Image (tube, rainbow, N blue to C red):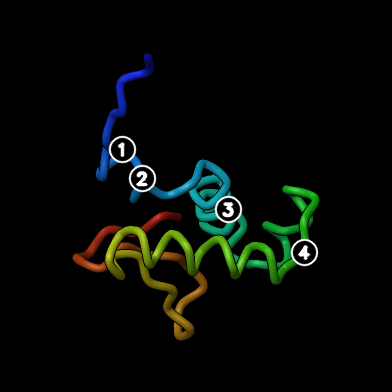
Amino acid sequence: MVKHVEPDKVLVKMPSLRAVKSFVAAAKYHNFTRAAEALCVTQAAISWQIRELEASLYRVVGWSRNSPALSLRGGFAAA
C-alpha cells in the first residue's frame, strides 16, 4: 500500500528554472529580444517567464521601462 504524502507547498510555489534562466538572460542582455535569441525562444516566451517569476515571487521582481537594466525592488540592480 502506498502512503499518501501531501505536496510541499513551498516547493510547489517555487518559480521554474526556465523562468529564472529567462530573468538572468534578460538582466545580462538588458533586452527581452536579445535574451530570447540567446535562449533560442521567442520574445513572448521570455515575457511569459518573467511574468511567471513575478507571480511566484509576489511581485518582487520588476522591469523598469525608464532604465535599460532589470532590477529587484529594494535597490538591487542586475547589470
Identify the disc placed on residue 42: 4
The amino acid at mark 1 is Pro
What's the residue at 55%, 45% (across, down)?
Answer: 21
Identify the disc placed on residue 20: none
The amino acid at mark 3 is Ser
Q: Earlier in the sequence, mark 3 or mark 1?
A: 1
Residue at the spot of label 2: 12
22 sits left or right of 79 in the view:
right
Q: Is residue 7 above or below residue 40?
A: above
Between the C-alphas of marks 3 and 1, the distance is 26 Å
**Is the Cβ of the residue at disc 2 closer than 8 Å to that at disc 1?**
yes
Identify the disc placed on residue 22: 3
Between the C-alphas of marks 2 and 1, the distance is 7 Å
Q: Earlier in the sequence, mark 1 or mark 4?
A: 1
What's the residue at 67%, 57% (across, down)?
Answer: 35
What's the residue at 70%, 71% (across, down)?
Answer: 44
Q: Nearer the viewer, mark 3 or mark 2?
A: 2
23 sits left or right of 35 in the view:
left
Q: Is residue 63 above or below residue 71?
A: below
In the rendered image, residue 54, in percent from the top left (x then y), is placed at 39, 66
Between the C-alphas of marks 1 and 4, the distance is 32 Å
The amino acid at mark 4 is Thr
Between the C-alphas of marks 3 and 4, the distance is 11 Å
Residue at the spot of label 1: 7
What's the residue at 47%, 67% (across, down)?
Answer: 69
Q: Earlier in the sequence, mark 3 or mark 4?
A: 3
**Is the Cβ of the residue at disc 3 closer than 8 Å to that at disc 2?**
no
